[in-house]
Amino acid sequence: MRLKTAKILFIVGVLLQGGNSISADEPRDAESIATSGRHSSLTKTDHIHYEISFTAKRKENANVKIAQESNLQSNVFSKILLNKNDTTKLKAKPHLYLPNQSADMRVKELYPLRIEQVEQLVEQNSPELDIYRRKIEQEGYNLKQTKSGLLPTIDLNASPQYYVGDEYNDSKADTNSERLKTSLSIELNWSLLDPARSAEIAAAKDSYEKAKATYLIKLRDLQLQALNTYFLLQKSDEGVRIGEESILASEISLKDAKTRFESGLGTKLEVLEAETQLARDKQLLTSKQADQKINRSSLSEILNLQESIRPKAISPRQIIGFWNSTLEESIFSAYLFREELNTLRLDISINKSNANYALANSQPKISLFNTISKSYTEGEYASLDVDGSSFNNTVGVNAKWRFFDGGKANAKYKLSKSKAKESEARFANKRNAIRQEVSESFFKLKNASQDLVTSRLEIISTKESLRLARLRFKAGVGTQREVVNNQRDLTAAEVRYSDAITSYNTNLTELRRKTGMDYVACENDTKVPIQKIEISNDDLSNSSFPESNVCSNMAINNQD
C-alpha cells in the first residue's frame, strides 16, 4: 500500500513539474517566433549555435524578468490576481482616506487589467465624476424647491402665555392678576399670479439638464483619457520587450565579434562597434522601463486605484478595429452626439429665462391668503374674571405692482439677452471646432493605417537585411558595422510599428468619442496575405476604411 502511494505521489510530482515547465516555456516560444527572421537562413552549424545561444539568453532573461516582476523594486511584493472579473480589489478608498504610514504606499500587487474593464473602473472609482454627480443632485434639489412655489404655503402658529402680577394703588384697592391665555392660528398663502415663477422654474430645469450633460462630457473625456493611457502602457510594455530582445541580439553579436577578434579574423573596431550597440540597447531598455512605470502610475491615478495596486495591461496589443463610416457621416453623427452643443443650447435657454425673470419683477403679483385663529383665556386680570374664548377667520387678497425701479429690470433683461447672443456665437464656434476635430482625427486615422502597413513591411525587410548581414559577416565578406546598422534599423522599425499601433488605436478611440459612433472590431481569425495589402492615393479620401488595410496587419503579425 505504501509503495502504491509513493508511486502515485511520484507521478503527480512529475506531471506538476511538466505543467510548470510548459507554462514557463510558452511565452518564450511565442516571442521567439517574432524574432526567428533574424537567423532563419544561417548555415546549419552556425544556425544551431545561434539558436542555442539566443534561446539560452532568452531563458536567462526570462528568469531575470520573473525576479524583477516578483520584486517590482527592492522589496516590493508582486501578486498577480487570477480572477479577471473580480474588481473588488480595485474599489477606491473613501474620499477622506489618508495612509497611516509610509508602508501603506508600497506597491504590493500588479493587477491584470483588461481593456474592457477600463471604462467601467473610471465610472466606478473617479472622484472627479463623483463631484459632477453631486452637482446633478444639487441641481435636482434646486429644481424641486423652485417648483414648490406653485403650491400654497400653510403656517401654524401657537402662543401659550401665563401671566401673574400684583398692582398696588394709592387711590383705590390693590389688584392681582393670574391669567392663562392660549392662541392658535393657521395661515394659508397662495401665489395666484407671479410672472417670475415660470421663468425661474424653466431656468432651474435647464440647469438640471446642463448638469447631466456636463457629467456625460466629463465621463467620456475621462474614459478616453484612461483608454489612451492604457494604450501607452501597452506601448511601453512592447518597448521593454523590444529592448530586451535587442540586448540579447547585441550580446550575441558582441560575443561573435570577440571570438573573431581572439581568433585573429576580426578587428578591435568590430568589438567596439558591438559594445557601442549593446550600450545603446541598454539605454533603450532603461528608457522604456521608466516609461512603463510612469504609465502604470498614470493609469492608476486616473482609475483612482489604491496605493498598493498598479495595473498590468494583459489585453493583446493589437489593432482593436476599423472605422466603417465616411467623413461626412462621422461629422453629422458628431453634431447629434456631442453634449457640448447641448450645453450651449441650454445656456441660451437659461439666459432667455433669466431675461424673462428680470422683466417679471416689474409686473403685478397677486396672492390669496386665509388666516384662521382661535384663542382661549382663563383666570383673572386686575382682579376681574377674564374667562372666555374667541374665533376669527380672515380671507383676503394681496396685490403688488412695482411701477418704477429706475430701469433696473430692463437693464437686467438686456444683459441676459446679450448673454444669450454670446452663447449662440459660442455654439457656432463649437460646431466649427467639432467639424475640425472630427476631420483631423479622421485623417490622422487614415495616416496611422498607412503607417501600420509601411512599418510592418519595414520590419520584414529589416529582418531579412539583418539575416543577410550576419551571413556576410560570418562568411568574411561583410563587416560588423553592417550587422550593427541593420540591427539598429530593426530595433527602430519595431519601435515605429509599436508607435503606429498606439497611434492607430488612440485615433480610433478618439474618433469614437467625438462622434458617438462605434468602430467595427477586428476578427481574430482574419487571414490576409501580405501581397493584398496595397497603399494607394484613395486611402486619403473621405471614404471609410477598408478592412484589409488595417485588420489584416494583425493577421500578418501573427503569421510572422
Image: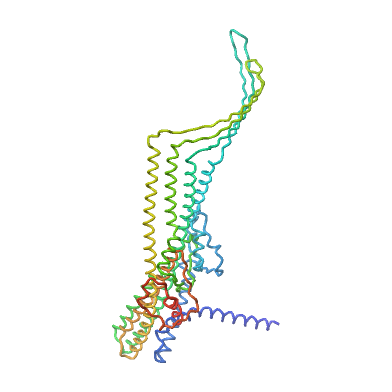
427 on left or right of 394:
left
Residue 450 rendering spot, x and y as whole percentages: 37, 75
257 on left or right of 554:
left
Which image quarter holds the N terminus? Answer: bottom right
255 on left or right of 122:
left
Which image quarter holds the C terminus? Answer: bottom left
Residue 31 rendering spot, x and y as whole percentages: 45, 79
Q: Which image quarter: residue 495?
A: bottom left
Residue 467 lies, with reference to residue 549, above or below; the image says below
Observer-nearest of 485 and 543: 543
Observer-nearest of 548 and 377: 548
Q: Is residue 301 visible?
A: no
Observer-nearest of 558 and 369: 369
User: Going by the picture, which residue comes out furthest to the top?
Assistant: 171
Which residue is at a point 41% across and 78% down the rendered structure image?
245
Residue 528 rendering spot, x and y as whole percentages: 45, 81
| Tally of numbered tags | 0
Residue 381 rendering spot, x and y as whole percentages: 63, 18
Display coloring: rainbow
Q: Is residue 446 visible?
A: yes
Observer-nearest of 481 and 515: 515
Which residue is at a point 56% across and 38% down the rendered structure image?
152
